[in-house]
Amino acid sequence: MGKTLFDKIWDKHVVTTMENGPSQLYIDRMYCHEVTSPQAFDGLRRRGLKVFRPKQITCMPDHNIPTVNQEYPLQDPVSRNQLEALDRNAKEFGVDYYPIGHKLNGVTHVVGPENGLSLPGMTIVCGDSHTSTHGALGAIAFGIGTSEVEMVLATQCVFQSRPKTMRITVKNRLKPGVTAKDMALYIIAKMTTGGATGYFVEYAGEAVKNLSMEGRLTLCNLSIEMGARGGMIAPDETTFEYLKNRRFTPQGKAWDEAQACWETLNSDSDARFDKEIVFDAWDIEPRITYGTNPGMGIGINEAIPTLETIEESSRISFAKSLEYMGFQPGEKLIGKPVDYVFLGSCTNGRIEDFRAFAHWVKGRKKAANITAWLVPGSWLVAKQIQDEKLDKILEEAGFEIRQPGCSACLAMNDDKVPAGKYAVSTSNRNFEGRQGPGARTILAGPLVAAAAAVTGKITDPRELRVKS
């Protein structure tokens, strides 16, 4: 029987397997940020251990850093302590470190792929659930806990139970005005937030193959939101073109050899998955969420489900979610006024997202009622924005670009949405308080965010004619 893409990479990285137990899996790359690494480094220190393979560890702060006046020392004492700890740990243990202000700093899951630190065929971990992002390159990438971070620091291995495999095929092509984020939110709504629990998902089909690399990164980023252990896409010419001549990718003859190896990373024609699911891209419209988990989503012109259409066991939580959001069952959200728009995060903070946003707002003005936070995912993205003069388009429309960081994706820094305010956000989670205590988050893609930013309300971006 043939092997799946997941099987090929997993089997190559297994060191040992316990009888009826987990496997010891070798890890090619681990990323560390300031939130989940301090206790892990402290554990090494207590045990008198060194980092086993420091060149395979990459550290950078992203969650707690401000996106204006980004310099040491930080004003917030909690953030300052966490960044100082990461700085101290990285220097003491000799691992690669990109502090704030460094040209390679940014959101971990943006920096890794765009610099070629993450490559096809790798096993990649981080103390962050959205590590699944890197699977878009054809890698096994997943989040781990702090005790496992310590394990990888000490041994470059981690114990993991082998997940089941699922293939999600999206046939046909996405319609104009529909993005990878819309595809991801559609899949999560259909699968529910627990529908892929216990599985590692491979995405396939015409719609997936025709995504840009940035779109694939967005899709895999959101795999965790349907309970999956991770998501991945077989590498192809799109992958190779994206990676070629990146800072840390192989060069010259080494590149040719690497690409030849990567070209074998696909699921065999006779490979069997534990579960197969098929969706049609033509069924996908621009999406928004109405509740407090990413699975509570609808097409932008659809109505919120009515109570009787919800499974009885879920009705109490459904009603509680709508109460928090201030919405009613059966209500349409199109035309609903909003207060904030956030473009950024490891989901939609890449250059393609800024190109799309700028393309849609060009020749228009930011709505007066909107506070907009446009946050590049890295300093490289920020440079590309300037090089392509997207910053001029955005400034003329009344927007300003902030400095890189996780920003309003989560309430760990200064960019918090006030209680009761509505935010159209290109981030990945809309849990209660995720963007600030009492904040009401509506997840969407960059085009829906752009339309909201210039109209001041939830608007179908396809209704706005793009100005030349």
Image: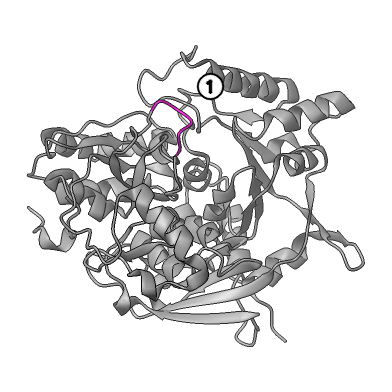
Q: Residues within 10 Å of mark 1 (few under 14, many from 20)?
A: many
In the figure, 74 relative to 30: above or below?
Answer: above
The one nearer the camera, 317 or 143, is 317
User: Which residue has dot 1 on it?
Assistant: 79
Q: Residue at x 19, y 34 (%)?
A: 399
Q: Position of residue 19 (x, y in %)?
A: 92, 67
Q: Position of residue 127 (x, y in %)?
A: 64, 42
The one nearer the camera, 258 or 372, is 372
Q: Is residue 468 visible?
A: no
What amino acid type is highlighted by mark number 1? Ser
In the figure, 197 relative to 466: above or below?
Answer: below
**Extent of the magenta region:** 410-414
The one nearer the camera, 186 or 205, is 186
Which element is circle 1 on? helix
Q: Position of residue 21 (x, y in %)?
A: 86, 64
Q: Within the image, what quadrant is residue 12 found in?
A: bottom right
